[in-house]
Amino acid sequence: MERAEIRWHRRDCAGHEGCRLLQTADGWRMDGAAFDTGADGTARTFTYRVDLNADWSPRAACVTGWTPQSDLSLTLTLASGHWHGNGTPDPALSGCTDIDL
């Protein structure tokens, strides 16, 4: 199975990100983490996992993290052509074909 690691740093503010891409039996999985400083100077941290089909189309994603103001936990899943956010159908995501973190 194929595997790759990628790391980069932000140019617009202090921060960096890294992820690994793993081939799975039915597609790909991308796991990563981002650490940066927002425009207001506060630190933010996020981890993510995106599951992709063999054709690179997304089927699920999980993002967790925190900012000084709040914690974040979001799971997106594609079921029968409809996206669900934290287990609840989300009509606002109807027609979406990609996940942009």
Image: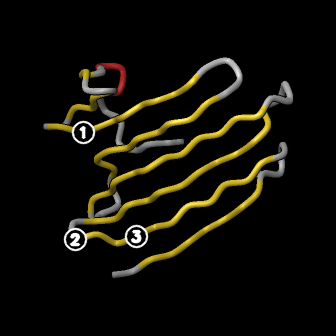
Kindly give the residue lying farthest to the left in the view shown. Answer: 80
- Residue 62, quarter of picture: top left
Q: Amino acid at mark 1?
A: Leu
The correct choice, above or below, for 43 with respect to 15 in the image is: above
Residue 89 falls left or right of residue 76: left
Q: Amino acid at mark 3?
A: Leu
Q: Which residue does the image show at 30% across and 21% down from the upper left?
A: 90
Residue 77 position within the rendered picture, expressed as x and y whole percent measured from the top left? 28, 38
Question: Would you name the residue on which mark 2 appears?
Answer: 25
Element marked by disc 3 = strand
The correct choice, above or below, for 15 with respect to 5 in the image is: above
Q: CA distance from mark 2 to mark 3?
A: 10 Å
Q: Which residue does the image show at 76% across and 34% down from the upper left?
A: 43
Question: Would you name the residue on which mark 3 appears?
Answer: 22
- Mark 3 or 1, which is nearer the eye? 3
Q: CA distance from mark 3 to mark 1?
A: 20 Å
Dot 1 surroundings within 10 Å: few (below 14), some, or many (20 or more)? some
Q: CA distance from mark 2 to mark 1?
A: 18 Å
